[in-house]
Amino acid sequence: MKLTEYIGSQFGNPQGILGKICCVIMNTINQKMYTQVSDIVLKNFCIDILDIGFGNGYLEKRLSKQPGVVIKGIDISEDMIVSATKRNKKAVEQGRVVLSLGDCCNLDFQDEMFDAVTSVNTIYFWSDTVKGLTEIKRVLKDRGIFVSAVYSQEWLKKLSYTKKGFKFFTKNDYILDGKKAGFSEVIIEEIVNGKSYIVKYIK
Ligand SMILES: C[S@@+](CC[C@H](N)C(=O)[O-])C[C@H]1O[C@@H](n2cnc3c(N)ncnc32)[C@H](O)[C@@H]1O
């Protein structure tokens, strides 16, 4: 495997030391995404939140500071459970952050459990986008919201390490897949023009 492909694979399933380093890089470059996702769920008074692909638990640390919020998270990487648990030690002990191994295409949660589902930069790695979105819709309460922060495909395609393991989507793809999964509305809001945006899926 080429070095660039190996680095790319670490974003989709971070493991070991390199996985940890990639997560710290993400924490630095994704600040605007974390802020926008947090602002949306908190403005909508969401209390029961599920985060898909939490990585090293940076968003959990931020959201769990809000009184009353309980954030559950799933990730396919066992190493990320260790990292995110360490980062959120106190909140995990208090049951305000609950982290487990899981794949968004097959969620181990009952129907209509969450006010909001969040995800920062994970949709490119799901094995089946519509299945993942359908599962997310299932676990959302009525009129619940899925907030997904993504980089544009134009931006991702400029990066050497995205050649393998990343799926690329246009804005229209996100809208069509959201509709296929049964969401009533899909709204796109720019974060940085041409580079990154939020896709809001309303149940
Ligand atoms: C690019 S990282 C983003 C991490 C974190 N959301 C952040 O922005 O700091 C993608 C994360 O999604 C996880 N992931 C990839 N596919 C997944 C899936 N199908 N279900 C759940 N998590 C997944 C990876 O293990 C990784 O931790």
Image: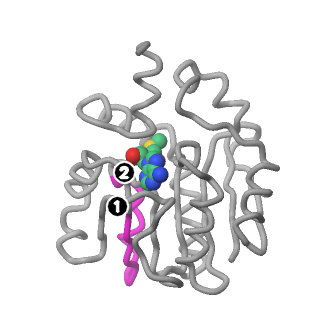
Query: Label 1: which residue?
Result: 61
Residue at position x 26%, y 49% from top? 78
Which residue in the rendered view is the most extreme toward the top? 2
Image mark for residue 23: none
Q: Are marks 2 and 1 in contact (CB under 8 Å)?
A: no
Q: Quadrant of residue 69?
A: bottom left
Residue at position x 45%, y 82% from top? 110
Q: Quadrant of residue 183?
A: bottom right
Q: In this rendering, is residue 33 above or below 5?
A: below
Question: Where is residue 192 shown, x and y percent of the image?
Answer: 69, 43
N-terminal of the two: label 2 or label 1?
Answer: 1
127 magenta-colored: no
Question: Where is residue 87 shown, x and y percent of the image?
Answer: 25, 54
What range is drawn magenta here?
57-73
- Amino acid carrying label 1: it is Lys
Image mark for residue 76: 2
Label 2 CA crowd tier, 10 Å (few <14, some 14–19, many 20+): some
| Ligand 1 within 8 Å, label 2 CB | yes
Residue at position x 51%, y 43% from top? 30
